[in-house]
Image: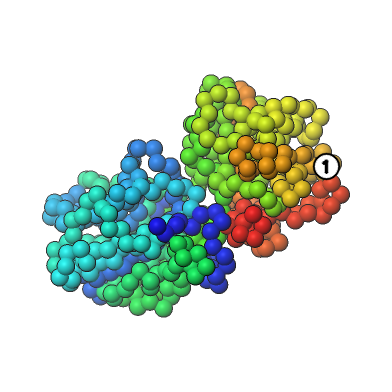
Amino acid sequence: MPLILGTNSIKDTGYDVANSLRFNDGSSDNIQRTYGTPTNSKIFGLSWWVKLGKPYDGSGSQDFWGERAGSNDRVFMGINADGTFEYFEKDGGSTVLNIKTNRLFRDNSAWYHFLLLGDSTQGTSSNRLKLYINGQQETSLATATYPSENYTFRLAIGSSTKYFGRVGLGGSLSTNYYDGYLCEAVFVDGTVTTHTDYGEFDSDSPTIWKPIDVSGLTFGNNGFYLDFEDSSALGNDVSGNNNDFTVNNLTAVDQSTDTCTNNFATLNPLDNAVSQAVFSQGNLKSTMNNSNSQGVGSTGTFWVSSGKWYVEAKLVDNASDTGTAFGVTGKVGASTTLLDRVGRSADAVVYTDAGEKAIANTFTSSYGSTYTNGDIIGIYIDLDNLKIYFAKNGTLQNSGTGLTLNAIANTLNGFYTFSVGMNAGGGSPVYEINFGGTQSFSISSGNTDDNGYGNFEYSPNITGDGVAKKFYSMCSKNLAEYG
């Protein structure tokens, strides 16, 4: 089974995707374009890469591409509430095609590639529509209704508006907006293509599917290639057709370097048993529910056992409470008691808003400065020397002396991950985390790590314990080198 592009997946292969576009469902983000006269609406290819933001919760779909002329004439394509992928078209009130997977898509930490190839001129019905996910054709389908021969795909017809991020499900446009990241969005109009025109399996890791350069494709009249590299024109089509998309509620801050060739860490919405946090902004903003006053928290999607890593965390709103903590933990997974990963587990080390350090549930007041709403905390995780350093608004705490971490072999799971949360009090505190790939809060200065990755308010390089140290953003390319 081909793998999704996860944390430590593939080496640098020479082809890099520079940018993605982040969609936030709470902001009703979407892009749209009205097609002109097609080259051939019986033949198309539609390819796109996504990293899902909103976790599966059984309520509402994640809408990808679609079109709507009315409740009886429309297209839906996306992730259902049960986690399956589905694509259907209605024409004149009848469902004329419908494919739905048995497989579920619930991973919020990695990139998926979706590809639809339509050719209704084929005599065999199952050849008229093919779905590939991560380079593998989906043949085990819960529903498989194929279009009739020489069917005109609504997805490819002219004079209708196509959307990414929202789809017409009923009498009006759906409010099930997409939440997550999109890159390498490609539509080919009227040319027969194969899955190897859009990606390839890695030569060293043959189960890993990766993107290739698609700029040489024959796109056709309505074809487009959205690479999201122009922050001033995020809907710019670089296929040569100038079939630009209109962007709705998206700005330059939504341009990201978290892509299918360099995957960045985010907060993990699946590790949410106690806090029941609401995640937004590409899983970089967490609004926590601490009404039980037991302690709440979130962890990161990347687990590391070696290397030096830098993360920035901003306290947006402490909800008039105290007990905020940023740091690391070796604890992840469901817990129904006081959240032991925020400074309380055997290998958790955090810096609290009261200026305390907390190590293995021992809180010491004489560590550093207090911090409050608007302050940015830098977390420097040195797993090569088992030290962690903290900075407040660029100033190292504890005179640059690091706090000691447990040896990796003695941690709960053999790894550390970023941790944020509140140890006490009630309310709904709000945090924004910057792992470097996407702006979770405004960056006024701009600093990268020494490999050129990340965008941080403060430098990832410090002098800790009297030694100059270089730290790196939590992305798959750095992880492949240092992790």
Amino acid marked by disc 1 = Thr
Q: Is residue 341 visible?
A: yes
Residue 286, quarter of the rendered image: top right
Q: Is residue 424 left or right of residue 10?
A: right
Q: Residue at x 52, y 25 (%)?
A: 336
Considering the image in quadrants, where does the N terminus appear? bottom left
- Residue 204, compared with residue 291, is above or below; it is below
- Residue 354, compared with residue 446, is above or below; it is above
Residue 366, quarter of the rendered image: top right
- Residue 193, compared with residue 132, is above or below; it is below
Please state the horizontal and vertical placement of residue 279, each as a whole percent of the image: 49, 40
Please state the horizontal and vertical placement of residue 135, each as a whole percent of the image: 38, 63
Q: Residue at x 21, y 55 (%)?
A: 144
Residue in front for this viewpoint, 12 or 93: 12
Considering the image in quadrants, where does the C terminus appear? bottom right
Q: Residue at x 53, y 59 (%)?
A: 9
Q: Is residue 252 visible?
A: no
Residue in front for this viewpoint, 265 or 208: 208
Residue in front for this viewpoint, 88 or 334: 334
Q: Residue at x 73, y 26 (%)?
A: 362
Mark 1 is surrounded, within 10 Å at the Cα level, by few (under 14), some (14 to 19) or many (20 or more) other residues, namely some
The residue beneath circle 1 is 401
